[in-house]
Image (cartoon, rainbow, N blue to C red):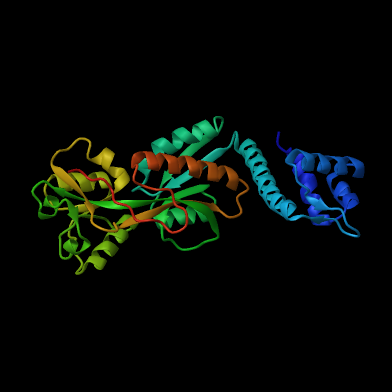
Amino acid sequence: MTPTLRQLEYIVALAETGHFGQAAARCGVSQPALSRQVRDVEELLGVALFERTRPRTLPTEAGQGLVARARGVLADVRELAEAARAHAGLGRAHVRIGVIPTVAPYALPGLLAEARLLLPEATFAVHELQTEVLLDALAGGIVDLALLARPFPAGGFAGTDLVFEPFVLVAPTGHPLARRCAVDREELAGASLILLEDGHCLRDQALEVCTLAGAPPETTVTAASITTLMRMVEGGLGATLLPASALSVELATTRAVRARSFAGDPPGRLLTLQWRGSSPHGAVHRLLADALRAHYLGLNADMPAVHGPCPAIVSAGQA
């Protein structure tokens, strides 16, 4: 036997008011009924929760601990109810999701499958947009959710970080960088890399890695998509950096390239799901974020969930 939620409400109300009559009034019950329920909980747990003193009833040490836990339980229940109500509000909605191009091909299939399970009567539209355009679309109400990589300018958004995704170096078979089991960042200094064209955040992140490694590389070859990048690498034009989630798709049909993880703390990107801070559906958006996080963890078992500072991880590259 455990205390009911209603009994926990009575105990919290009594602790906050210090008076049986006031607590009963707050909970909408008679004073004798509330007093009896509190006594029932004490008998159930075998400990006194309150000192019945005048003019104020005080929690005992055991009572203080139970009240603190009860507040947390009741808060979780309220959030659950809010999520359910928001879920009902979104049930027949049209949900618009914006995704950056270097995430879309690898995250969207799993995200949409999970989203349909969570919101079976909703419809979904996907907009593939580069970061700057995507943030404007989110702020302007053109999309409801934005899946992108940090950092980005603050703009009154709310959201939750998903996973820290490592970068992996991909090079043609026989390329000097492909011969190493693990690549040191310093080895990228002066190397000729194929990067995405301007406007893609993955290009900026890759250039940042190269800058940290030393002299910036020659980047005379650019591409419009990760798939195009891979075809260039496959053709022997040079090496590139890929997010780990892209490997299973982009390396599935070729044996002309090798993927190498980075030694030590790998470079990478922090993926996040954002929505407007004014959205009434934040609880449901968090449910979608949980589904997306699980999807990414399935793509790469080495990618941990984000709890505070993102830990460093090593991606599993091809041998």
- Residue 202, percent from left and from top: 31, 55
Residue that sits furthest to the bottom in the current view: 215
In this picture, residue 214 sits left or right of residue 284? left
Residue at 75% across / 42% down in the picture? 46
**Viewer-closest of 170 and 199:** 170
| Quarter of the image with the N terminus in it | top right
Q: Residue at x 64, y 45 (%)?
A: 76
Number of numbered discs: 0
Q: Quadrant of the C terminus?
A: top left
- The location of residue 111, given as percent across then percent down, is 44, 38
- Is residue 18 or residue 271 the one in the foreground? 18
Whether residue 235 is visible: yes
Choose between 29 and 37: the one closer to the eye: 37
Question: Residue 37: x, y in percent?
Answer: 83, 40
**Toward which corner of the image does residue 89 lie, by quadrant?**
top right
Instruction: Note whether 58 is above or below 92 in the view shown.
Output: below
Res. 286 image quadrant? top right
Report x, y in % for residue 86. Answer: 63, 41
Furthest residue in direction left, as rendered: 174
Say which residue appears at 67% left-offset and 45% top-offset: 73
Q: In this view of the protein, can residue 223 be seen by the observer? A: no
